[in-house]
C-alpha cells in the first residue's frame, strides 16, 4: 500500500541509529507513528475532495438510468464499497503474511488496523445493496451468489476481529490473526465459486446483475472517483488506527516522545 | 515416526473411550437438532424430504464444531501439547493423527447415525446412501478445517463461542457440496460431481490444514 512507499518521499527525519534504507527505518512502529500522524490528514483530505467530486458527478452530471431511474445512483457508493471490501481483505492478508514471515510488528498492526475498515465497507456494500434491491428487485435480500459471498466475507472479517480481541497478548493476537487471514484468503476463491455454483443450482434466473447495459462514461467516471475516495479514506483510517495501536502497545510516551524529537529535528 | 503417530491415535481414542459421555453428548446434540426441525416446520413428509439433506448437514456441521473444543483443550491443560511441540517428529503429522482420532470419535458416529435420521425424514434408500457417503467424505474435512480454529483458540477464554465464529464461514463450501450432492441425487441428476468436489476439498484440507494447525499451535503456546 502507499504507506510504505510514501516513506521515500516524506521529509527525512534526523538521522537515527537505525541502519538500512529510509523506508526500512519506518518499519519500526515508534518511527512510523509520527509519519502516520503526518500522513493521515492528507489522505483524509484527498478522500473528502474526491468524495465531493465523485458525488457531484454522481448526482448532478451522470444521466438518469433509462431502466432503473434515479435509484441506480446508489452504485456510486455501493460498487466502490464492494470493491474496497474485497481489496482490503487481500491487503490485510498480505500485511498479515508479511508480519508472520518477517516477524515485523508494524505489518501485523497494519493488518489489525485494516480489519475494521474492511468490515465497515463490507457492511456498507450489503446495506446499500439492500437499499438498491428493494425498489429494483422488490426485495431487500436475495440469496444471489454475490450477496451471499459478500455476507460470508463479512463473517470472515468478524472472525478475524473477534479472534484478535479475544487474545490478550498482542504478539499472539497478531500472529494468530495472521494465520486466520491467510487461511481465509486461501478459502475465499473456494467459497466464492462454491457459492456461485450453489446459487445456479438452486435458483433459476430470477434476478441477474450481469445483464446491465453498457454504462455511460460519466457514470463510470463517478464510480471510479468514488472508488479513489474510498481508497484514500481506507488508507487514512488505517493509518490513524495504526497510530492508535502503536500508542496503545508502545505507550503514549514512546509515540509522543518520538514525535517530539521529530518536531525538534525539523525546526533545527 | 509411524509409532508416534499410532501412539497418539491410540491414546486419543482411548481417552475418548474413557470419556464416552462427551462423545455421546455431541451425538445426542446432532440427533436433537435434527429432530427439532420437524417440530418447527410441521410433519409434512414432502417438506421433510426436501429439507432433509440441508438439515442433516447443518446439524452435522454444528455438532462437529461443538466437538472441536475437546480436540486440544485436555492436552493443553495437562501439558501434553507442549511435549508434542518439543517432539522430534514433525508437529503437522502429530496433529494429523490427533485430528484422525478426533474424527473417529466425533465424525464417524455422526456418519453412522445419519441413515437412521434419514429414514425419519422419509428419504429414499438410495438417497440415504448418498447422504452417508457425503458425510463420510465431508466430516473429516470439517474436522480438519475446524482443527485450525481449535488450534488458534487453545487456552483462550470464550474459545467455545469463538471457534464456531472462525470455523463456520470456512466450512461453507463443504456444506454446499455435501448437501448439494444429496439434493442432486434426490433430483435424479447424479451426485458424482458433488462427491468428486467434496473429495477434492477433503484432499485439499488434508494437505493444508495440518500445516496451518501446527503453525497455529506454535503461536498459541509460544
Image (cartoon, coloured by chain):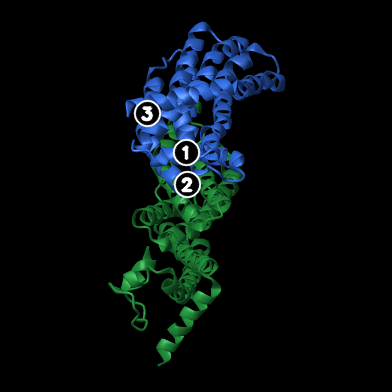
Quadrant in the picture for the C terminus of chain A = bottom left
What is the chain letter for disc 2? B
Residue that lies at the very extreme toward the top in this rendered image? B125
Q: Count of labels shown? A: 3
Which subunit holds the residue at mark 1? B
Question: For the residues marked 3 and 2, what is the alpha-carbon distance in whole angstroms?
Answer: 21 Å
In the drawing, what numbered circle is on residue B140? none
Disc ID at residue B221:
2
Upstream in the sequence, badge 2 or badge 1? Answer: 1
Q: Nearer the viewer, residue B83 or B192?
A: B83
Name the spot of residue B152 as percent of width and height, x first: 49, 43
Residue in the foreground of this view, choosing between A221 and B1:
B1
Where residue B96 sits in the image (x, y, percent)?
A: 40, 31
Q: Earlier in the sequence, mark 1 or mark 3?
A: 3
In terms of secondary structure, where does tag 3 sit? helix
Q: Nearer the viewer, residue A85 or A64?
A: A85
Residues at circles 1 and 3 in contact by the CB criterion of under 8 Å: no
Q: Which chain is blue?
A: B
Q: CB of mark 2 within 8 Å of CB of mark 1?
A: yes
Mark number for residue B81? Answer: 1
x and y percentages locating residue B137 in the rendered image: 43, 21
Q: Which residue is mark 3?
A: B4
Quadrant where the N terminus of chain A sits is: bottom left
| Location of residue A31 by image quarter | bottom left
Name the side, left or right, on which A189 lies relative to B43: left
Residue B66, image x and y in percent?
A: 58, 31
Residue, far bottom: A268
Q: Is residue A63 visible?
A: no
Amino acid at each position: 500500500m502507499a504507506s510504505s512507499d510514501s516513506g521515500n518521499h516524506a521529509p527525512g527525519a534526523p538521522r537515527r541509529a537505525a541502519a538500512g534504507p529510509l523506508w526500512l527505518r519506518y518499519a519500526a512502529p515508534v518511527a512510523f507513528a509520527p509519519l502516520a500522524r503526518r500522513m493521515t490528514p492528507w489522505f483524509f483530505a484527498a478522500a473528502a475532495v474526491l468524495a465531493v467530486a465523485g458525488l457531484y458527478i454522481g448526482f448532478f452530471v451522470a444521466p438518469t438510468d433509462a431502466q432503473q431511474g434515479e435509484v441506480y445512483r446508489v452504485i456510486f457508493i455501493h460498487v466502490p464499497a464492494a470493491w474496497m471490501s474485497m481489496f482490503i481483505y487481500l491487503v490485510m492478508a498480505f500485511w498479515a503474511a508479511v508480519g508472520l514471515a518477517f516477524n515485523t510488528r508494524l505489518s501485523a498492526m497494519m493488518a489489525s488496523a485494516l480489519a475494521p475498515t474492511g468490515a465497515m465497507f463490507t457492511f456498507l456494500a450489503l446495506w446499500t445493496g439492500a437499499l438498491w434491491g428493494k425498489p429494483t428487485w422488490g426485495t431487500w435480500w436475495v440469496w444471489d451468489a454475490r450477496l451471499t459471498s459478500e455476507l460470508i466475507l463479512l463473517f470472515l472479517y468478524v472472525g478475524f476481529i473477534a479472534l484478535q480481541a479475544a487474545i490478550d497478548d498482542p504478539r499472539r493476537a497478531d500472529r494468530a490473526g495472521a494465520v486466520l487471514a491467510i487461511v481465509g484468503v486461501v478459502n475465499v476463491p473456494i467459497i466464492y465459486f462454491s457459492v456461485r455454483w450453489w446459487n445456479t443450482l438452486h435458483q433459476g434466473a430470477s434476478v441477474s446483475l450481469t445483464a446491465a447495459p453498457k454504462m455511460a462514461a460519466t457514470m463510470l467516471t463517478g464510480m471510479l472517483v468514488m472508488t479513489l475516495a474510498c481508497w484514500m479514506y481506507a488508507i487514512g483510517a488505517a493509518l490513524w488506527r495504526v497510530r492508535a495501536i502503536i500508542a496503545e502497545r508502545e505507550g503514549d510516551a514512546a509515540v509522543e516522545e518520538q514525535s517530539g524529537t521529530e518536531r525538534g529535528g525539523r525546526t533545527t | 515416526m509411524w509409532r508416534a503417530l499410532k501412539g497418539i491415535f491410540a491414546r486419543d481414542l482411548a481417552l475418548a473411550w474413557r470419556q464416552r459421555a462427551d462423545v455421546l453428548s455431541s451425538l445426542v446434540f446432532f440427533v436433537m437438532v435434527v429432530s427439532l426441525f420437524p417440530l418447527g416446520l410441521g410433519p409434512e413428509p414432502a417438506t421433510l424430504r426436501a429439507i432433509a439433506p440441508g438439515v442433516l448437514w447443518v446439524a452435522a456441521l454444528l455438532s462437529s464444531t461443538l466437538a472441536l473444543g475437546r480436540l486440544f483443550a485436555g492436552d493443553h491443560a495437562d501439558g501434553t501439547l507442549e511435549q508434542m511441540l518439543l517432539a522430534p517428529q514433525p508437529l503437522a503429522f502429530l496433529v494429523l493423527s490427533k485430528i484422525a482420532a478426533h474424527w473417529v470419535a466425533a465424525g464417524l458416529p455422526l456418519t453412522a447415525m445419519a441413515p437412521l435420521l434419514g429414514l425419519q425424514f422419509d428419504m429414499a434408500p438410495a438417497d440415504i446412501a448418498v447422504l452417508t457417503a457425503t458425510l463420510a467424505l465431508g466430516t473429516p474435512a470439517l474436522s480438519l478445517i475446524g482443527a485450525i480454529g481449535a488450534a488458534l483458540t487453545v487456552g483462550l477464554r470464550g474459545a467455545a463461542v469463538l471457534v464456531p465464529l472462525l470455523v463456520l464461514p470456512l466450512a461453507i463450501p463443504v456444506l454446499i457440496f455435501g448437501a448439494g450432492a444429496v439434493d442432486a441425487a434426490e433430483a435424479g441428476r447424479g451426485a458424482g460431481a458433488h462427491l468428486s468436489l467434496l473429495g477434492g476439498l477433503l484432499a485439499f484440507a488434508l494437505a493444508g490444514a495440518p500445516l496451518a494447525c501446527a503453525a497455529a499451535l506454535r503461536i498459541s503456546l509460544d
